[in-house]
Image (cartoon, coloured by chain):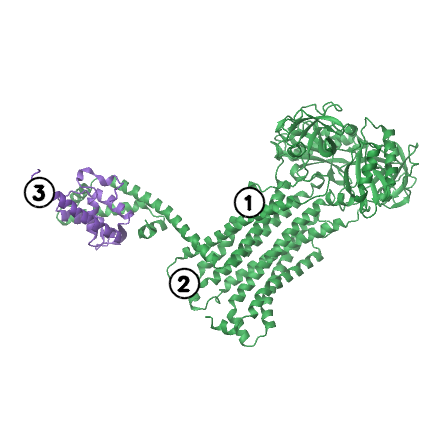
Chain colours: A green, B purple
């Protein structure tokens, strides 16, 4: 049955959500009443007439029920069919209408696809790093602990003994684990490969609540005793890439750093380690594959382990913080030589990504990025709305004629809405494609570092759902205003006036407001992008206090079984001597710790003969152990005194070099040369200061200089050292000869972390995340710029189309081309400047919240603000020029005759 | 000829042949729009009460025919200013009436021929 046969009264019923039952009752009542009346007319009395009428009718109740059921069923099926019929009619109509303006479709779909697609991609990155909990039953409840010091506000790793004391607090912690990511050499038939292993407490996996895919994880006690349980659990990726997904691997022994180590399990693919950014290869119990590390486990001054765990159910974060604070002050009293002024920070794991050091910043970074995502989405929606609004206005005549020949307002509004939905669906599909490409582009970013950076970004269901919701919202937002515009059209006005030049002023104002608002938001996004970019470039050019260029780094570690202190020192001295002889090498040094590395140490300094107030346990200052021409190689200026020499060997009185911050803190206004202090607390050895060097950046960019102590290797042997080599312009060229030096000294020496200092800074803790943040912000900025351009172009070219007659008239009356150009471009510029003005005010009011995550640039940086104004002005001019050119080609004869 | 799905229509005591009521309704409405009571009254008067049709059977037939597009309906006022639902024949209904009437004629002629037959079977 076709729609035309549907009874009209049903439409009214449907419209008013009519009462089928009432209609049936009314019809039957009428029948009975009419028959009763008829019988009365032939002489029956009222009661008798009524009963006869009822008798004649038959079973009234049954008839009523039958009719109601029939009508309701019919009603429901009609409604269903009508909706379907409307859709099958509206969608082809919408497609036909849209196909008449292909350029509009392309612009709208591209705008939506870019806007939604790029924001989806960025959302998936932010989600992967900041929001998604770690895998495992307890992934979402994890907390991390960090050591804080009076002079170092950023939390960092704990000493192992401190970790043990916090772990003992079982009333607060359900479980607490610790780990250090380390490089280890895997020996295979192909040669040696480097693995990143988390050297971890045996409860590592039970803290997470994770089960292995193959084999088992560690049992309690697997981390007790040196090399008593040499075992390793592999990650899925390492198992797949390094061991060819060998299903028989469990129980097999592999050789790590020369020791046989049993593979006891393989983890499922979703596990990548406890740090979401780093892709480790496996986990080994502490002390089992890395025995040299054992000594650090008893050293309270060694900042050795990252600590993570979960609270007992019912224990709030505040309670736990209070408890660890109490424990920290107990430790301060019990171990004043190492724990003086040492506090502890406890933060949810997801705020401590990529490391606990930045836990003060992570929430701000996440907030800024999510705000950018929402803003860009809003801009895209505003753009689409304004384009569609223009379309409705331009189609005024068509809509008016359709209204005149009987299309209801609702029908026209529905038509506009369906067109928006079709566009949104196309845009959404495009968005998924854009997001897919963008996510893979992110994954292909190559970070030149030994840290296995993981781009665990996938276009998963959450992101697709996000895209779908965003598309739906975009369709709604973009559709409402044009639909409302279609509803308000006044038939008479449109038909009376010529095609197009009616442009109800309200619509034009609304469109202009939309575009101005969009430009304002673009300004905010661009200012954020600019601030990030400046921040990043400042950070790159920052004065580290040392010269990063031309320095090569190579790390090694000596096994304690083969090398005691004497043999170790002898080997390192020989390494220095031979490396210095390599052609192209200008100076060489050895250093236990490198700036912006993952390890550092603190020693408690108790100065002798000072007027400064010295706490009983001394000051906890950073310590490094160096050999060779360390300061010359690093380019750290020696301000007073001298560098270490070979004479600073194992003499009775130890020597030390301190930095300017140290000297200034303890002996302000006098020379520190010749002054003496205890290291390792008041009972530790006494050393004499032989040199004062310049301050350096070490932990966080832009930190205020921290007091630093340097000790010569001859007086403080370390098994692990990093060779630092200053070379000519191409540091990498000396890598092969230096590797040869290592292997002639001892073929089994592991060599790892081979990189230039510049790469170490760019791709390491120092700069990587600033750079990535700036890259993402730049993508947003460019997107906002493109969208702003489309917006201005849309409004101006629409207005040129509207004013064809007027412009034609002006030309006819003698207006010159420059005047026409000024007229059109001026309109675009006015719009842009209104938007820029509002945007500047918004930026000035809001970017203050970013101050904590910017480096060396104020949130209201005039350079950034100025550049944004210039760029947007330029974009507005470019966007207006195309329609302006069209305006100059208007032929007055044609345009005036066209109606 | 479509068969009815309504149970109310097939009241066996009527002794009416399937579809006969439909034809009568179509015929009634062929004179012009009528409400249900009018249709019932016309059929009663025309058949001179020979066919005792209960009114309760009439309405389901009317509604069913409306769903099938044979008739149309609308609410209107009677001469006495009462609101009543008037049914109108649609063009589809008119076609249906013609088809049904001619097949009824052939049917009744055939039956009549049999009943009044004067030729003995061979």
> Is the residue marked by circle 1 packed among few (<14), some (14-19), or many (20+) residues within 10 Å?
some
Same-subunit check for callouts 1 and 2:
yes
The residue that label 2 is drawn on is: A401
- Dot 3: chain letter: B
Q: CA distance from mark 1 to mark 2?
A: 40 Å
Task: Provide the secondary structure element on which disc 2 rests.
Answer: helix
Q: Nearer the viewer, mark 3 or mark 1?
A: 3
Q: Which of the labelled discs sits on residue A443, or is there none?
A: none
Q: Residues at marks 3 and 1, common chain?
A: no
Q: CA distance from mark 3 to mark 1?
A: 83 Å
Q: Chain of mark 1?
A: A
In the image, A470: left or right of A348? left
From what the image shows, is residue A205 above or below residue A867? above
Instruction: Determine whether A823 is above or below A576 in the image.
Output: below
- Name the one closer to the observer, B16 or A18: B16
Quarter-of-image position of residue A623: top right
List the residue tagged with mark 1: A466
Q: Which quadrant holds the C terminus of chain A?
A: bottom left
In-image side of A267 versus A396 (left or right): right
Looking at the rendered structure, the secondary structure element under dot 3 is loop
Location of residue B73 in the rendering, given as x and y in whole percent from the top left corner: 27, 51
Can I make out residue B25 in this image?
Answer: yes
Provide the chain ID for the residue under circle 2. A
Q: For residue A656, which quarter of the picture?
A: top right
Within 10 Å of the Cα at label 2, are there few (<14), some (14-19), or many (20+) other Cα atoms?
some
Residue for badge 3: B116
Task: Residue A287: name its quadrant.
Answer: top right
């Amino acid at each position: 049955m076709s729609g035309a046969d549907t009874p009209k009264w049903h439409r009214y019923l449907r419209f008013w959500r009519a009462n089928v039952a009432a209609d049936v009752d009314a019809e039957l009542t009428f029948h009975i009443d009419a028959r009763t009346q008829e019988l009365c007319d032939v002489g029956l009395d009222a009661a008798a007439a009524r009963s006869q009428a009822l008798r004649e009718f038959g079973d009234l109740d049954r008839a009523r029920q039958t009719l109601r059921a029939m009508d309701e069923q019919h009603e429901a099926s009609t409604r269903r069919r009508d909706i379907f019929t409307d859709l099958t009619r509206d969608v082809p109509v919408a497609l036909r209408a849209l196909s008449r303006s292909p350029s509009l479709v392309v612009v709208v779909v591209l705008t939506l696809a870019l806007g939604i697609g790029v924001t989806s991609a960025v959302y998936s990155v932010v989600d992967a790093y900041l929001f998604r909990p770690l895998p495992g039953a307890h992934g979402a409840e994890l907390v991390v602990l960090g050591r804080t010091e009076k002079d170092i506000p950023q939390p960092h790793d704990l000493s192992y003994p401190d970790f043990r004391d916090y772990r003992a607090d079982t009333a607060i912690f359900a479980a607490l684990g610790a780990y250090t990511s380390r490089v280890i050499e895997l020996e295979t038939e192909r040669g040696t490969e480097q693995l990143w292993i988390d050297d971890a407490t045996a409860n590592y996996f039970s803290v997470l609540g994770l089960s292995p895919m193959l084999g088992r994880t560690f049992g309690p006690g697997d981390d007790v005793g040196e090399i008593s349980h040499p075992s390793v659990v592999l990650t899925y990726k390492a198992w797949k890439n390094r061991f060819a997904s060998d299903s028989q691997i469990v129980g097999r022994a592999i050789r790590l750093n020369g020791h046989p180590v049993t593979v006891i399990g393989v983890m499922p693919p979703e596990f990548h380690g406890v740090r979401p950014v780093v892709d480790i290869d496996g986990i080994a119990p502490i002390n089992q594959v890395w025995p040299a590390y054992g000594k650090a486990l008893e050293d309270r001054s060694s900042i050795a382990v990252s600590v993570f765990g979960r609270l007992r159910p019912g224990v709030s974060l505040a309670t736990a913080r209070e408890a660890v604070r109490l424990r920290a002050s107990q430790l301060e009293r019990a171990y004043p030589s190492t724990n003086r002024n040492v506090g502890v920070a406890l933060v949810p794991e997801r705020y401590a990504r990529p490391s606990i050091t930045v836990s003060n910043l992570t929430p701000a970074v996440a907030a800024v990025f999510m705000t950018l995502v929402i803003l860009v989405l809003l801009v895209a929606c505003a753009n689409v709305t304004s384009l569609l609004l223009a379309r409705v206005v331009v189609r005024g005549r068509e809509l008016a004629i359709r209204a005149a020949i009987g299309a209801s307002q609702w029908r026209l509004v529905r038509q506009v809405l369906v067109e928006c939905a079709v566009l949104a669906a196309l845009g959404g599909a495009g968005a998924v494609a854009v997001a897919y490409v963008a996510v893979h582009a992110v994954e292909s970013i190559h970070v030149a570092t030994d840290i296995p950076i993981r781009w665990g970004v996938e276009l998963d269901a959450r992101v697709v759902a996000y895209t779908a919701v965003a598309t739906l919202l975009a369709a709604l937002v973009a559709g409402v205003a044009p639909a409302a515009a279609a509803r308000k059209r006044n038939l008479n006005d449109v038909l009376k006036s010529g095609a197009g030049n009616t442009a109800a002023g309200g619509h034009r104002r609304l469109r202009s407001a939309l575009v101005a608002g969009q430009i304002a938001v673009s300004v905010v996004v661009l200012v954020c992008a600019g601030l990030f970019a400046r921040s990043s470039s400042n950070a790159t050019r920052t004065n580290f206090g040392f010269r990063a260029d031309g320095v090569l780094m190579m790390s090694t570690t000596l096994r304690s079984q083969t090398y005691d202190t004497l043999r170790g020192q002898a080997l390192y001295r020989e390494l220095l001597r031979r490396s210095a002889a390599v052609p192209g090498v200008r100076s060489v040094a050895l250093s236990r710790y490198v700036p912006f590395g993952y390890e550092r140490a603190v020693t408690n300094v108790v100065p002798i003969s000072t007027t400064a107030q010295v706490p009983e346990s001394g000051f906890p200052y950073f310590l490094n152990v160096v050999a060779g021409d360390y300061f010359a190689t690093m380019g750290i200026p020696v301000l007073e005194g001298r560098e270490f020499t070979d004479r600073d060997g194992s003499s009775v009185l130890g020597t030390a070099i301190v930095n300017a911050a140290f000297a200034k803190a303890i002996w302000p206004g006098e020379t520190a040369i010749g002054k003496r202090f205890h290291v390792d607390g008041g009972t530790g050895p006494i050393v004499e200061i032989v040199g004062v060097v310049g301050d350096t950046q070490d932990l966080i960019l832009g930190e205020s200089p921290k007091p630093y102590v340097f000790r010569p290797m001859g007086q403080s042997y370390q098994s692990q050292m990093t060779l630092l080599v200053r070379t000519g312009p191409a540091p990498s060229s000396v890598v092969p000869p230096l590797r040869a030096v290592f292997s002639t000294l001892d073929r089994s020496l592991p060599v790892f972390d081979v990189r230039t200092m510049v790469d170490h800074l760019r791709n390491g803790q120092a700069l990587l995340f600033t750079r990535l943040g700036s890259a993402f912000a730049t993508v947003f900025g460019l997107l906002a710029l493109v969208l702003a351009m489309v917006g201005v172009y849309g409004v101006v070219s629409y207005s040129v189309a509207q004013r064809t007659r007027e412009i034609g008239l002006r030309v006819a009356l003698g207006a010159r081309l420059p005047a026409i150009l000024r007229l059109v471009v001026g309109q675009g510029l006015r719009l842009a400047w209104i938007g820029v003005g509002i945007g500047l005010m918004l930026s000035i009011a809001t970017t203050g919240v970013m101050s904590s995550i910017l480096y060396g640039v104020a949130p209201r940086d005039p350079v950034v603000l100025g550049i944004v104004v210039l760029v947007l002005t330029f974009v507005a001019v470019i966007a207006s020029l195309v329609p302006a050119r069209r305006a100059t080609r208007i032929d007055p004869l044609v345009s005036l005759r066209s109606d | 000829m479509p068969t009815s799905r309504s149970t109310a229509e097939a009241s066996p005591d009527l002794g009416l042949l399937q579809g006969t009521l439909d034809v009568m309704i179509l015929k009634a409405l062929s004179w012009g729009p009528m409400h249900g009571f009018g249709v019932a009254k016309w059929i009663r008067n025309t058949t001179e009460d020979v066919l005792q049709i209960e009114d309760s059977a009439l309405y389901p037939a009317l509604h069913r025919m409306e769903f099938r597009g044979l008739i149309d309906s609308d609410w209107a006022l009677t001469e006495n200013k009462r609101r009543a639902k008037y049914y109108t024949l649609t063009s589809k209904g008119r076609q249906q009436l013609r088809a049904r009437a001619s097949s009824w004629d052939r049917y009744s002629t055939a039956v009549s021929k049999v009943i009044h037959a004067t030729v003995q079977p061979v």
